[in-house]
Amino acid sequence: PDIITRSEWPIRVIDGSVVISLLDDAQNQGESALISLFEEKKLEGEVSLTEVLGDQLVDGTGTAPSWDSLETIISTVNTTTVGGIAGSDVSWQNYQAAVAGAFNTSNNGITAMDGAVRGTSFGSRGPRVIFTTSAIWGLYYISQAGNIRYYNEELADAGFQHLNFRTLPVLWDDNIDTGLMYFVDTNALWLQVLRKGNMVTSKFRESIDQLSLVSLMYLFGNLTTGSRRTQGVVTGISS
């Protein structure tokens, strides 16, 4: 018998167009062509798509056309259906708990973080990184006053400001909703992208109704997971 429960994820799309004015193209020629206009516009499009993707991976609702995200996979209501599998089964529920009070009162924040790590760890499997808001990151920073502040050298070299909780880097993102802290098992959370839809840029073609060249840029994929129980969220965090 087949004992494996398979999750199913819809393919989502992020797309846009790159437009170059024929006048700008004509002026950007010869010795005056300081930059490649095509390459500059392509880079602008990639940056724009990446920003949209970043928003979707944190805040996406999972309902078309929105992508699945931390918000849907590591849900504050952990009995939701994710990947086509009902959350009524405890093995397909992420950890969820509210902090007992103000973060830095009676060690409420540290206690909640400890509970989340223990509640999502099974042997060697469990969270690998913690994401929260800038405000909550600041509360955690204050809670560590007078203590040794451990950090990850690779993340520091990459320019990410962070601290560690146990061995887990704690980072912030401005897309995360107020009061939330996510405990993310990156070994079981995957950005799945179709090979023929991985930041593809089509050839530039002349527009039929304006003096411009137009190219399409698109990304096909979704955020998926194979393990919800090694993911967690702490809610209701305040100062």
Image (tube, rainbow, N blue to C red):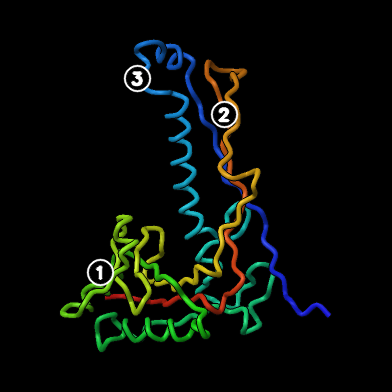
Residue 94 location, quadrant: bottom right
Relative to 190, say whether 44 is above or below: above
Q: Give neighbour class at mark 1: few <14, some 14-19, many 20+ (Cα, 10 Å).
A: some
User: Residue 104: percent from the left, percent from the top?
Assistant: 25, 81
Q: Are marks 1 and 2 in contact (CB under 8 Å)?
A: no
Per the image, label 2 sits on a secondary structure element best described as strand
Q: Which residue is mark 2?
A: 215
Q: Give neighbour class at mark 3: few <14, some 14-19, many 20+ (Cα, 10 Å).
A: few
Amino acid type shown at disc 2? Ser
Relative to 99, say whether 38 is above or below: above
User: Residue 109: percent from the left, percent from the top?
Assistant: 32, 81
Q: Which residue is mark 3?
A: 34
Write the residue at 72% across / 75% down: 5
Q: Is residue 32 left or right of residue 53?
A: left
Q: Nearer the viewer, residue 20 or 6?
A: 6
Q: Which residue is mark 1?
A: 138
Amino acid type shown at disc 1? Gly
Amino acid type shown at disc 3? Leu
Earlier-in-chain disc, 3 versus 2: 3
Per the image, label 3 sits on a secondary structure element best described as loop
Q: Residue furthest left?
A: 146
User: Residue 34: percent from the left, percent from the top?
Assistant: 35, 19
Of the two numbered discs 1 and 3 in the rendering, the one whose residue sits closer to the viewer: 3
Residue 85 location, quadrant: bottom right
Write the residue at 19% across / 80% down: 147
